[in-house]
Image (cartoon, rainbow, N blue to C red):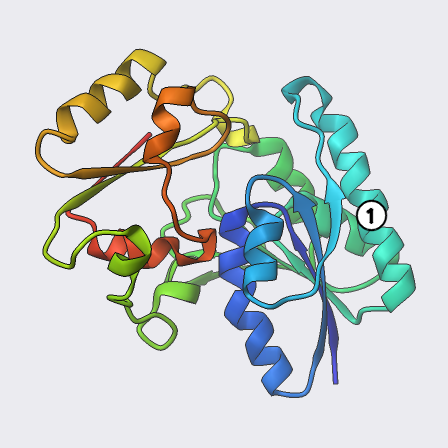
Amino acid sequence: MHKVLFCINTPAQAYTWRYVIKGLHDQGHQTEILARDYGNTIELLQGFGLTVHAFKAIASHFLRLFDMVTHLYHIIKVSRGSSPTLLAGFGVDTAVASFILRKPSIVFTDSEPMPIQLFLTRLFASQIITPDCFLKNLGKKHTRIAGYKELAYLHPNHFTPDPSIYKELGISPNEKYVLLRFNIFDAVHDQGRKGFSIHEKYRLVRELEKYSQVFISAEGNLPADLKKYVLPVPVHRIHHVLSYAHLVVGD
């Protein structure tokens, strides 16, 4: 029997590991989850019925080095209390912590424009998994798989669209709706990039609501007069919303 510590930093990672964690439990293994309090990560994991060790993130781009130290501190702290046999995650924090703790690690990544993080991951991780479209060669520890992280939770074995989402949205099954997704662009790989301006967000709403109901899923804060469009469903139901939407617009 193994005890796996999952280091989860983002909502997307919460989705990715959800059924992996369930599968391990079904096979009699134990898991611990350390999650960064970022976006809807904690809310998602708790919505999945999972118990979480949560810690606060450092939001500033300029303090990311200290953010890394914070991650390592909490991983090591939880590990010393639970004694995992394996660490799993997406980030370089998982790789470095596993090296310090002398524990094996599995790190998944699909982001290539992060040379420093990839170098450290390659140096310290026990095994690195990427999609087979990943172009860089990360050495002998690198395993490419014929799939994407999204299939870990959207494969038909795990996901079936639920038409009751219309009731949760407060609209009839015959009514068209559009989902607007606004990103906050504060991740490491987002540096130098930007999304829709506030003017463009208003224009999208004005134009699209001429033809259908509009809902907004947004990171960060929205102006007060756009909050009436906020998606009225729990965050862990978002893929059912996406499945039935007539149009999805995101930045």
Residue where numbered disc 1 is placed: 74
Image coordinates of residue 194 in percent, x first then y, are 41, 19
Q: Identify the image quadrant of the N terminus.
A: bottom right
Q: Is residue 78 left or right of residue 149?
A: right
Q: Is residue 34 above or below residue 159?
A: above
Residue extending farthest to the top is: 199
Q: Is residue 101 above or below residue 189?
A: below
The kind of residue tagged 1 is: His
Relative depth, front residue between 204 and 187: 204
Relative depth, front residue between 167 and 242: 167
Crowdedness near tag 1: few (<14), some (14–19) or many (≥20) residues, C-alpha within 10 Å = many
Image coordinates of residue 247 in percent, x first then y, are 17, 42
Q: Is residue 110 above or below residue 244?
A: above
Image coordinates of residue 21 in percent, x first then y, are 60, 71
Seen at 28% across and 66% down, the residue is 164
Q: Is residue 49 left or right of residue 66?
A: left
Q: Is residue 162 left or right of residue 96?
A: left
Q: Quadrant of residue 69?
A: top right
Q: Quadrant of residue 212?
A: top left
Q: Is residue 155 left or right of residue 111?
A: left
